[in-house]
Structure formats: C-alpha cells, structure tokens
Image (cartoon, coloured by chain):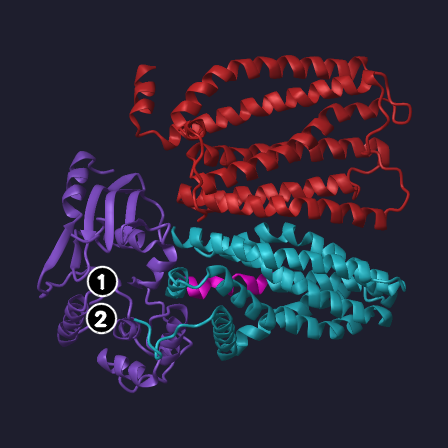
Amino acid sequence: MAKSWKMPKWFYQLGSPRWFYDISSRLLPWFAVAAVLLLVLGAAWGLAFAPPDYQQGNSFRIIYIHVPAAVLAQSCYMLMAVAGAISLIWKMKVADMVAKSCAPIGATIAILALATGAIWGKPTWGAWWVWDARLTSMLILLFLYIGVYTLHSAIDNEVNAGQAGAVLSLVGLVNIPIIKYSVEWWNTLHQPATFTITEKPKMVPEMWVPLLVMVIGFYCFFAVALMLRTRTEILQREKRSSWVQQLVEGK
Amino acid sequence: MSTPLLEAKQLFCERDERVLFEGLDFALNAGEVLQVEGPNGSGKTTLLRILSGLSSAFEGDIFFQGEPVSEVRDNFLQSLLYFGHLPGVKATLTPEENLRWYAALHPETDTMRERILEALENVGLFGYEDVPCHSLSAGQNRRVSLARLYLSHAPLWILDEPFTAIDKKGVAAKEALIEKHAAAGGSVILTTHHELAIKNLRQVNLGRIETAELREQPND
Amino acid sequence: MTNSTTSDLGLGAVFWITLKRDLLLAFRRRNDLVSPLVFFLMVATLFPLGVSPEPKFLSEVAAGVVWVAALLSTLLSMDGLFRTDFDDGSLEQMLLSPQPLALLVVAKICAHWMISGLPLTIMSPLLAVMLFLPDGAMGALVVTLLIGTPTLSLIGAIGAGLTVGLRKGGVLITLLVLPLYIPVLIFGTGAVQAAASGLPINGYLAILGAILALGVVLAPIAVAAALRISVSN
C-alpha cells in the first residue's frame, strides 16, 4: 500500500474511535435539533407557503424533497470515497467506519431521490419513469452504492472489506464525472428539444430559500444518521477495548 | 554485533477476535535457521505471511537489514524466497515452464536448463520436466515448488511446512540444503512438524501465548 | 551475487514473458476460449427471437445489441482472470515479486483482451450482418469495439481483483463492474448510430480513446491494490 505521510497529531486523534465517540455524543443533539427544525421549517414553507410554479403548478413542490436528496446522494458518495482513501492511506479506523456507514445511507437517499423523481414525473410527463439524464445518472449512482455495499457484506474480514470497498468507491469516484457526462450527452442525442422538468426552473427567492433550508436540513439529518451508524460500528468493533466495556457496564 | 537480517518488534496479530500473538520479538541473523513452533491454529502460517508481506493484518514493526521493511520493499523482495501452503504451480504448465516463470518474476534465480533439470532431480522429479503439472500428484506439485530452493540465490527463505509430501530421505536432503544455505550466510525461517536435525537451530514458540489465551476464554 | 545465468530481466521482458505465459495457458485450455464467443453469438440471437425478426427494427437496435452482448461476454470471462492464479498460489508469488505488480497486471489484462475482446471484435461483423446493421456502420462497429473492449477488460480487472478471494465472485463482479461500463457503452453505440446516419465519428473515437488512456493509467494501480487486499484476506 501507499507510503504513509506524516500528519499533524490532531489528524491521528481524529482517527481514534474513542475520541470520535466522545465528540459525536456532544455533537449529536445539536445536529438532531437542527435537522428537525430545518426540515419542519423548510417543508412547511416549501409545501404550503412558496408560490406555485407558473408551468407546473403545485406538482413542482416535490423538489423540496427531490433536490436535497439528489444533492445529498452525490455528496455522500464523495464522502464515502474520501473517507475510504483516508483509511487506505493512513490506516485510520474511524475513516473506514465512516466509509462503511455511508454506503447504506447513501443508497437509501438515492432511492428517495429516484422515488420522488418518479412521482414528479407522473403528473409532468404522464409516466412514472422517463429516461431523463438526471434520473438516469441517479440510477447509476444507486448501482454504484449497491456495488460498494454488496462488496462490503461479501467479505468477512472487516479490515479487508473496508479496504476493498474503499478501492471500489475511489474507482467509482473517478468514473462519476465520466458517467454524468456520457449520460447527459446520450440524453441530448435521444430526446432532442423536449422540455426537461428536472432542470431547475427559474426560481424566485420565495422558492429557493425554503429549498436551501431543506438542503441544509438534509445535510444535518445525514450527519445525525452517519454519526449514529458510525457509533454503532465503533461499539461493535471496539467491544473488547476497556473503554467500551466500562461504558457498557456504567449504564 | 551486526544488524540482523530480519527483525520483528512487538508483533501483535488477532484473527476472528482471538489474539494469535502479542509482544512477539525476535531477530534472525545471517546464517541462522529459525523454527516457528506452536500447535495447529496458533498462527504460524499467519506469522510467515506477515513476515513475507502478504498480510498486513498486524501491528508492530518489521525491519529488514535494520530498515523498516515498508521502506526497503524492493530490496526485501529481491532477497526473499517464500514457500507457502499453495505451491504456486500452474497445472497447465510443465514443471520447467513453471520454474522459468518463477525465475522471470524473481531475479536471482538460475535459469540454465541443466540447473533446472538438476533441481527437479533433487526433488525426485527426474524425467517429469515436460509433463503438465495437472498430471502430477499434489505432493509432486509441492516438490516442483520446492525445486526453487535449489535455483534461488535469495538469502532469506521463508518456508511454510516445506517437508510435507516428502519422504524421509528427501527430508534429510532438504535439511542438508537448509544447513548449506545457512552456512553460506543465508537465513531461513520455517514451520514444520518434523523433528529437525539442524545445527544451531533457534526456535520461536507461539504455543504458550496461545494456550494462555485459550484458558482465559473457553468456548469462544 | 548476480551472475550471467540468473534471470535479471528488464521490465519489457517481464511484460512479454507474462503475456506469453497467459496466452499459452489460454491456448492449452482452448475450450474455455470458445465459450465467451458462443455466448456472444447466443445473446445476439435472443433479440430477434425475443423481440422481432423484422429487418427495420433489427437494424435500429443492432449496434446496441452487439455492444451489450460484447459487454456481457467480456464480463463472463473476467471472473477467471485472477481466479486460477489465486487458487494455486501463483498470485502470491506475483505479489512477492520485486517486479512491479501493476506491470504484471497490465500484461495479464492484455492477454485477456487478446483472447476475449479481440476475437469478439473480429466476430462482430458476423453478428452485424445477422442483425441487418447498415453497411455504412460496419466499420464504426469494428473500430469502436477495438478501442472499447480493452477498456472493458481494464475496468473488469478491477472487479476481478476485488472479488478474487470470494467464493461467489462471479455474480458480484457483474454488480461491481456493469455500472462502470456504461460510458463505454454509450459512446460505443453512439458512434455506430452516428455512422449509420452518415455522421462523422471522430469525436466519439477520441472520447473512447481518452477513456482507454485513463483506464490504462489508473486501472492497473487499482487492480494491484485490489489484489493485495484480496490476498491478505
């Protein structure tokens, strides 16, 4: 494997599962509260108060779920690949656990994005599924997630599983721009000049501010889900270390 | 005292939530033969795989000629001959082709035809050089792999159970070969169930740690 | 210690020896060579049977069918790329060689392409005729397959390296690799369709070439890393 570069001390501290566990228990409540507040606020604002779209009427309101989910699904993949790279290069345990936790969360969010896209498609195109460039890219992203997740669960040894998953997600990361580009190009070739709804409509601030709130809310929710999963993973893997045993006995 | 050829410091390895060894220290000097001992499942093969660099599932440091092995990897691999559980012999190739392929991968291996035939003769495969390996027995395949010992000039040999599938006379010949290798300044680290008749044999025991661990966690 | 009888070879020589060895291995098991080709042919036969034998319809889908069949057929043979080496211990010896692993990997992939992708490319005009591909697109089909199939082998090798230690590698590898094949499929079929409508295809070929170049540079590194992980299991 690659040579290890020396990094500052805090970087290695970040890699200590115990440190992550402590800091995440302090951060969790804040993120949880922020997620709930932002999601409730954004949803109410977007669904009830934002003005309807002049072309699509009220059906456009699903973007308040669809767009944040689509954005988050992509960033989650990036995080998974970057965390995987960190765990490969610096053998950092927490990064490995974060990468592992990303796959199922990311896949779920990608499914959410696809489902909302399909629901949006029905009133707009009259069909549940249309081979739209963005939806197709999202579908392929879901395939990539499924690949990483399946590979993870196929390998018994968790260290090897983490490393293999990291290599695959990095390969995927290199491929994502190529896939996106090729799918967009393919789409223009096969559906010339049709009106694409998933392209952002020209939005007035009353429309995009709640969207922004929703996006931030989704990120907070993602942080909460990721921390919870990673914490479970930490407890599972470190169950024989003294601090976890003390924690369990203390309760 | 000169720096040892291979040195392990504070090796720790656990497998399936069971500690195989911890705090393991040893040094292997030029001209020494080191036998890794321990009951089945005590991690002998794992240790050899770690030392050869095949497995990275361990903590601790390994030094080659005084340098961390990860930093002198090329040099280390050039000096290494590894004989593992799997013979590394292709069934569809003949013994001679297999040995030539090995020689291509590992410089410091003899490639002259006479030497290859001689090596095959030494492992009791005289006349088999052109027979595809799939028509040889499993034991014969292991012996094809063992023939590398006669061809390689690598100073460090890591041998995992090299004497299975060899008769008594063969074992004596291999012991003589190992002694000769050590006398010429080479080093050997090996596992075996045979009683070795080798002078200056040193031993590392993985068994003690293992049994202590077993007593602590029965049925786990 | 070096003397003239030992094998101190340059990188080029090691590449050739590995390539020749893999070709020899494949040649000695000739039956295995034929099955991906027969598979290729069969998949293409299923479309007229399953959908419609009408020439107009077939000529429209021919490019896609041939490409998809080539993709699946490459995948089918991919699983074996490292499997026997893993099972008999040759892979361990490759990892413990002072020769760069990525170089050995490239040689093996090259050999794999010569026994899978290249025969597929050569066979593709036959399928194209059966599926009524317009004559003008024939050349484009062969050229895109010629540039595209090496990429398929390179990407597939990553999947093969990651799954070589697993018992159920065969199914898993398709899940890992197929999504990564999509750009090659899109540009490959795109070029053939463009040629069928009389448009220039230089741009497509350039993109396919660029993807191949990227693959040649990056895939061997990923495969080498994947193999180290799989063997250390």
Q: Position of residue A125 (x, y in %)?
A: 85, 36
> Which chain does the numbered disc 2 sit on?
B
Residue in the picture at 72% in, 20% down: A212
**C53 left or right of C216 in image:** right
Q: Which residue is mark 1?
A: B161
> Which chain does the numbered disc 1 sit on?
B
Can you say whether A208 is above or below C176 in the image? Answer: above
Residue C163 visible in image: no
Can you say whether A6 is above or below C137 in the image? Answer: above
Q: Are marks 1 and 2 on the same chain?
A: yes
Of B189 and C154, nearer the camera is: B189
Which chain is painted in cyan?
C
Q: What amino acid is labelled 2 in the image?
A: Ala
Asked if the magenta segment contains residue B107, the reply would be: no
The tint chain A carries is: red
> Magenta part of the protein: which range?
C75-86
Question: In 3D space, how far apart are the residues under numbered discs 1 and 2 (Cα atoms)?
Answer: 10 Å
Q: Which residue is mark 2?
A: B165
Q: Nearer the viewer, mark 1 or mark 2?
A: 1
The tint chain B carries is: purple
Asked if the magenta segment contains residue C84, the reply would be: yes
Q: Secondary structure at mark 1?
A: loop
Which quarter of the figure is the N terminus of chain C placed in? bottom left
Q: Secondary structure at mark 2?
A: loop
Q: State the predominant SS element of the stretch in magenta.
A: helix
